[in-house]
Amino acid sequence: MAQPATNDIDSDSLRRAAIDRSVKGPVLFLFTNGAFWLMASTILGLLAAVKHVFPDFLDHDWLWFLQYGRLQPAHLVALVYGWGIQAGLGVAFWIMSRRTGQELRGGHATLISAGVFWNIAVTLGILGILFGGSTSIEWLEMPKYLWPVFLICFLAYAWPMVSMFARARNPGGFMISAWYMLGASLWFPWIFITANVCLHCLPGLGAIGAGVSAWYVHSTILLFFVPVGIGAAYYFIPKVTGRPIASYQLARIGFWALAVLGGWSGMQRYMGGPLPAWMPAVGAASGVMMLMPVGVVGWNHHLTTLGKHNLVQTSPSLRFTFMGALFYPISSLMFAVLSAFYTGASLQFTHAWYGFQIVTIYGFFSMCIFGAIYYIVPRLAGCEWLSVRLIRNHFWFSVYGISAIVVTSLVCGLQQGGDMNNPEKWNLGFFAVVGGIKPYIIARAVAWGLITWSNVWFLIHLMLMVAGLGRRSSSPTLLPGHDIEDPMHNLTHPTHA
Amino acid sequence: MSDFRKLVFRIGFLFAIPWLLLIVVPVIRYQHVGPVAYDKDKDGMDGFYPPAPIHRQGQLVYAREGCVQCHTQMIRAANLGLDAWRKGWGQDQGERAADPVRSNTLRDYLGEPVAFLGIQRAGPDLANAGWRFADRNKLHLMLYAPRALTTWSTMPSFKHLYVVQKAQGQKSSKALDLPAKYAPAKGFEVVPSAEAEALVDYILSLKKDYPVPGLAAAKK
Amino acid sequence: MSSPSAYNPDTTDLDRLHPAVKREKIDVAPGTEPSPMWVIFLALLVAVLGGSQLGNVANFAFETSNPLAGAKLPDPRPGTGGGGAELDPMQLAMKKGAATYALCGGCHQGSGQGVPGAFPPLAGSDWVMGGTERNIRVVLHGLNGPIKVKGADFTAPSAMPPQGAVLSDQDIANVLTYVRNSFGNKGGMVTKEMVQKVREAEKARATPWTGAELDKYADKDAAADAPPAAK
């Protein structure tokens, strides 16, 4: 017999409302700025893809800085720091305060200031990359003086989250999402400090430095994006379906497996290279073994949503979260294929790596975050989402775009790797490679175009909500589905029997 | 210990193990990695390995332009890819090199703040570009107008690293020899800026195929 | 848990202020059944797969980047190699030429049919089957301006770019041999010595040819030595 948290529903609701009110400012600030950077990043991604295969496009002297070598890192920095970490922090903060039942008492000004400085740092970072300050270190391309700003702003959010967790009084079974958010708050600063100190403060590290840089990228993915995404899924799937998480034991196995495996990955990016041989091997092993926690979490979510697929259709929040949870095993499979020596050697130094980054950050993480945002914002803004059509637009164009990127980057990677490693072409120039990847990069540009389209409307929709211009109603904005439980169903679909 | 402290301790401990083993210990050990002397008897040559450092100023320009997005600097082990056998990717620039190019080791990147091993290969590997581009002017031409040399190339043009200046009487010795399509207006010439020269110096300093002491003997 | 503030209708009127919160479902504790056996089994399988990646490593030495360094590895390149069967030079040229043709196919099409009005066909073309002196020059330095192939006109602006800087003599010889023996063409072989001689003779050439300039080479074949004997 399932046990509810408390028996006092009204006081629960009051408490939740108080928590929502207390975190409203910082969380909405992070979401809005994040959405803006997401749009900027998708536009940069589109431009980068076009410039990759048509380098003479927009070939004006005053646009000299629009080159693939600068656009691509700017695109990824905007995506990771402008959107990913910022929106992730917003969601993590809200979930942590809700799950621990702690209101945010004071410190709002600090949080908003930290948010402002974070965005200033992202802006300076991207301008720095575009105008000649890039360090060319993957995911740390912003000029090197910016990293302490990022760190302090992140800690400004991480510290209250950790202290909320410390004061929490909920029984263990309800804290799964909170563990993941706690993990992310502890892991990311550790990873960030390590990478930046090693690469910017210590004397020359040569090839070991390259290893640290690769470790940084993988660790940020596995120990920030993955926990925040899964934590959100573990919160919202039971919340919206009203069902419990299927298995507490599986949830714990999943969490601890991630905690064990997450920090070992990264060096397999440079397999066959100058790093001491055991490092890529250990990274490859961890990359393959990640299939285990992913499978476990996926199975747990699957069991939780069984029989509630009508809710997946109607609830925007659940729809996005479900899709994100679906992309998680897909991205993990790509990760395993990229990491293992046998397959990874053909995909090394190809577009498959970029595809994996995007599938994880956009397909899995961002979809879970969108699901969270569609749930959280009405509660903070006091109004409901305005337009079903905009939500559907956002959903479907994102799905089309990200599916296109998954498929084209994998196929392109296989093609590129095959051409690079083909013994028949050992003495020929790279024209086979260059010609072969062109159609896939064009497809990628189109995909980013679709995603830009979906996110422009998302940004507008979000800004309207934050301005309080949403629907004044006590019923949620639901997508049309064939939910016979929906009391509005007959009124909105009069022709159905 | 409260549950919270136990949880944080466990999370911290589990992460500290890979952090120490993969990052901290190798970084410390790397500080003790230095050049190795060749043994005149066994290796047949004198001096130290690696013999020549890269051009650091030029590496800054390389970083700023984002060359790592399309070029790698890492010859992979032969069992993982074709790098070792590709024409012109090593010291031997002949039509058909007899031996495979050796895979790169830690010491090949000695002296570099961060080795730019590369993100993707949309263009050839540059680990041994110093031998491949013997002609400095050809390299300048490649940077200024890549499609003048290879029509199918998608390499961006680094025109902003070059200065179009009025030809003062005699053509400058550093002026680029451009085909008609890319040549400047009459009376003007294209001259590399200091950054372009540094970048070319850097690329020409990329020579990572010197024999490894001890292994050279094994190859014979 | 926070206690609600002193009674004030504005802060506690849930229906008005936070209807969204009121309709939230009750939190329910997760299920406590143990995990199914097959999950453990699959997890072990994944661990085995992952562990197999460690097989590559001989030791944990800091200095070892490549455990196979110094080992004698088989030469995967086709042609003369460690004991591989030698291909007939014509077959080798056809094979290499086919790969190099990827460069040409963009305009002349994979079928060699070209695009009417823009890119001349290579199939059954009088130019291709004509003098090799002309063909070699076209590939080396490019071709501009109106020409007539198989009776059809092909005018500028689609000029053929020069390939002399990109392709070596052997590459040009291979691709010309391939083109002269494919798409229904039946011609002889072009050797790298022929290309070399033409390249030497036209060393001063910096601009692409025009149709008129090449007329005098239309029937001339480059001096061909006997194809190199198989080594």
Image (spheres, coloured by chain):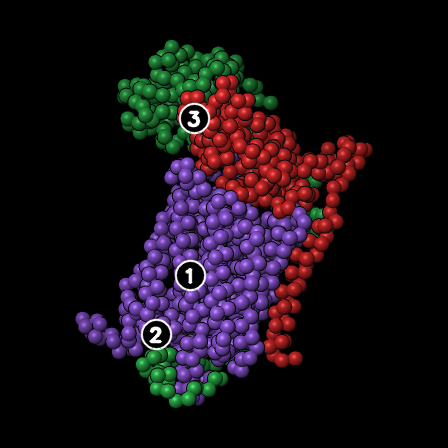
Chain colours: A purple, B red, C green
Q: Share a chain, discs 1 and 2? A: yes
Question: Marks 3 and 1: in contact by CB < 8 Å?
Answer: no
Tell whether C86 sits left or right of A15.
right
Query: Do callouts 3 and 2 mark residues in contact (Cβ within 8 Å)?
Result: no
Query: What's the CA distance linking mark 1 and mark 3?
Result: 45 Å
What's the amino acid at mark 1? Asn
Among the 4 quarters of the image, the one containing residue B173:
top right
Quarter of the picture containing the C terminus of chain A is: bottom left
Identify the element where label 1 is drawn: helix
Q: Residue at x 34, y 79 (%)?
A: C17
Within-10-Å neighbours for mark 2: few <14, some 14–19, many 20+: many
Where is residue C147 shown, x and y percent of the image? 32, 19
Q: Mark 1 vs mark 2: which is more N-terminal?
A: 1
**Marks 1 & 2, CB-CB < 8 Å contact:** no
Residue that numbered label 1 is attached to = A33
Label 3 chain ID: B
Q: Residue furthest toward the left?
A: A495
> Percent position (x, y) of residue A220?
54, 59
Image location (x, y in percent) of residue C39: 53, 69
Name the quadrant of the N terminus of chain A.
Answer: bottom left
Q: Chain of mark 2?
A: A
From the viewer's side, name the closer residue of A125 and C199. Answer: A125
Amino acid marked by disc 3:
Pro
- The numbered mark at residue A382 is 2
